[in-house]
Amino acid sequence: MATILRYRPQHEKPSVWSVSVAFRNPKETDRQKLLKELLKDVGINKAFEYQTEGNGKPYILTEGRKMQISLSHTKDITVAAIHLKGRIGVDIEKCNRKVPAALQTRIISTESEKEIDTLTLWTIKEAFLKMTGTGLRTAMKDVKVISKGLNIFKVNGKNAEDEAMVYALRYREYRLAVAVEISKPD
Ligand SMILES: CC(C)(COP(=O)(O)OP(=O)(O)OC[C@H]1O[C@@H](n2cnc3c(N)ncnc32)[C@H](O)[C@@H]1OP(=O)(O)O)[C@@H](O)C(=O)NCCC(=O)NCCS
């Protein structure tokens, strides 16, 4: 059985988005089981289908309704996230992962980003690019990160519609970032 942990900022409405982290079994975490738990956490107890867009971005279908999800893995852990009102992206990395100096210069796009720890900045930008669906096809320099308080960042891409709040979380020896699209009014 995977150990499932949940993260959800207290100021967010409980049923809009949710993130679960599962420790992998010695072999493979059961993705279906993890996604089922995640759906249950946002109040949906229905059968679903896992699918991907042409660019590899995953989503799920339940009774014809498309819901945005995101997944990230390390050797030991899988993280999955769902957002009912918009796009979502997650990234998880082990804290001791080094970002080579040459790469740092390819990541940082503004003076204020230099204040952010490099691995945190990396996870924020990767989570954001998974939210948009382009992944690393888009240069990290084209993503701008502004700190909005402890572990909360506002992130913008080149396209005006690509805008998210990113939550930088820490669990044991892992850092994870969750990019949540800023919800448009219904
Ligand atoms: C998406 C991407 C950032 C994933 O990064 P990663 O460090 O390899 O892996 P992670 O564990 O964080 O994420 C893997 C998950 O990303 C998801 N994913 C794949 N393509 C995606 C996309 N275009 N958008 C959002 N999510 C995507 C999948 O759910 C995958 O999970 P799975 O292996 O269970 O199917 C990276 O693979 C990428 O940029 N791909 C698109 C461009 C490309 O293929 N580039 C080659 C290298 S530059």
Image (cartoon, rainbow, N blue to C red):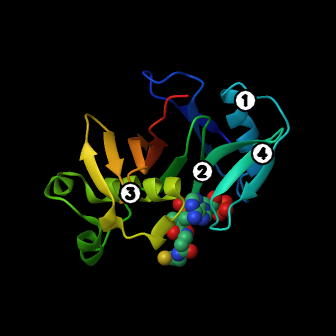
Q: Type of residue at label 4?
A: Leu
Residue at mark 4: 61
Q: Which mark is residue 125?
A: 3
Residue 42 lies left or right of residue 139; in this view the side is: right
Q: Position of residue 5 (x, y in %)?
A: 58, 35
Q: Can residue 43 be seen in this snapshot?
A: yes
Residue neighbourhood size for the residue with mark 2, other residues' Cα within 10 Å, grouped as few (<14), some (14–19), many (≥20): many
Question: Is tag 2's residue or tag 3's residue first in the polypeptide sequence?
Answer: 2
Residue neighbourhood size for the residue with mark 1, other residues' Cα within 10 Å, grouped as few (<14), some (14–19), many (≥20): few
Residue drawn at 66 percent across, 52 percent down: 24
Question: Is tag 1's residue or tag 3's residue first in the polypeptide sequence?
Answer: 1
Say which element carries label 3. helix
Question: Is tag 1's residue or tag 4's residue first in the polypeptide sequence?
Answer: 1
Q: In the image, is residue 96 above or below residue 1?
A: below
Find the distance from the CA under tag 1 to the CA under tag 4: 14 Å
Residue 182 lies left or right of residue 23; in this view the side is: left
Find the distance from the CA under tag 4 to the CA under tag 2: 14 Å
Q: Position of residue 152 (x, y in %)?
A: 33, 38
Residue at mark 1: 40
Say which element carries label 1. helix
Residue at mark 2: 70
Q: Type of residue at label 2?
A: Ser
Question: Is tag 4's residue or tag 3's residue first in the polypeptide sequence?
Answer: 4
